[in-house]
Amino acid sequence: MDTTEFLQQMELPTDATLDAVEEAFIVHIKARLQTSAENYAESELQTEEKWLRGQFAAYFIFTGDWIIKNKYMPETAKEAMHVKKIKEDAESAQEDLQKYITEFASVYMHLGRFTVLLRDEIKGEEKRKASMNANTNARWSADVGMMINRYRKEKDERLGNIHRLKSAIPVIEHMEANITALTEALVGLFGKDKASPFIRSLTAAFRTLDYEKIKRTTRNVLETKKRFTLDQNSAKKLYDDVKNIVQKTAHLIHENEKTLEAPDKKVYLKTIEIKAAIQSDIKDLGKIKGYLSKYHGPYMQHKLNAINHLKEKLMVINTFESLMVLYKRMIIGIASPLSDIKEIRLYESEVVNHVQYLLQGHFKELPNILLRGEETVQEFRDTRKDFAAMEALPIEATE
């Protein structure tokens, strides 16, 4: 963009003064920043960033041309050496100050957009709470933050556990059929009373994944004499059935240990146990859902406060307007004569030294402020996504 086009954008003549251009430029930039913040669109972010940097580049081209046109060329004898050194320091810092101002405006733009994003979400949450006649007296604290992080992880664990347990039901049903057949075979071999210890031993071994005990108990079964009234052919079939059923059941458990695992590191053996565990997880999810719903509004306000804190940190030393004034004072000092001792001292202390201070400290902090803002918004988005998924679950919220 050339200078003529740049000035035309602000409806200024080609011979506009530095003061007029500076004033119009500040209004021009602030208006666009306000518009882009109020109409937050992620897809337009790169376009807005490119526009902003292009505008500053054009403004600094204009000021560079202004310096060339207006630069005072003193006779060497009339300009003290220390004044010359001050001006050289200002000229050497000019480009870095331009970069600083551009980055400052960019970070300010992003934080403004982040603020609107979170503010609009908070308004939406307030409407949701109002429509539900929900409790709006919840307050944020560090403990609440810890609980939200804990519950987000626990929610994922519970959902994963429910999915696992539901996938275990067909396995359990198969296993229950095996154990029922095994019980019938043992009772057929030995009668109910004599079979009971074998049934209990094998069931306990299945549940505790004690494969050695399974083998040992199976050997004892095969070595134990059948009922007197049972014929040899029927007994042989039942012995074979016991051996085969135990092997199939042990193999089934071994292949599905993780799927069937209970909290005590044993395994579930009955459908009723699985369903009870699923209901327990659903009940816990209801508590989590209720807590997250209760504190979702305070959480969002907490994140908005974090963004506002970053804005305060950004502007603890400067505002956009004050930086523009500082830059103008610097280039006027570069281009204009400095003869009065008071004027020289003010320019050195309030302009050149202040610029160097900013470049050595606050300038380096700008990327960190932007990064923390981006992280805060990403944390907010992740939590909002989790919250939406939690709200969509057909689980009654409880507290």
Image (cartoon, grey):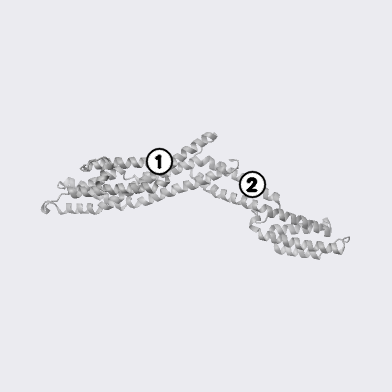
What residue does disc 1 label?
A: 39
Q: State which tag comes first along the sequence, 2 or 1.
A: 1
Q: Which of marks 2 and 1 is in front?
A: 1
Q: x%, y% of residue 221?
A: 79, 63
Residue 136 visible in the shown view: no
**Extreme right residue here?**
229
At a point 40% along the width and 46% down the height, the residue shown is 44
Q: Which label is found at residue 368?
A: none
Q: x%, y% of residue 158?
A: 59, 49
Q: x%, y% of residue 114?
A: 41, 44
Near mark 1 (Cα within 10 A), the count class, few <14, some 14-19 or many ≥20, is few
Please state if 187 lies on the left or on the right of 350 as rendered: right
Near mark 2 (Cα within 10 A), the count class, few <14, some 14-19 or many ≥20, is some
Q: Contact, CB < 8 Å: mark 2 with mark 1?
A: no
Q: What element carries label 1?
A: loop
At a point 70% along the width and 51% down the height, the residue shown is 271
What residue does disc 2 label?
A: 280
Asked which quadrant contains residue 323, the reply is top left
3D distance between C-alphas at marks 2 and 1: 45 Å
Going by the numbered disc 2, the residue's amino acid type is Ser
Please state if 88 lies on the left or on the right of 306 as rendered: left
Going by the numbered disc 1, the residue's amino acid type is Asn
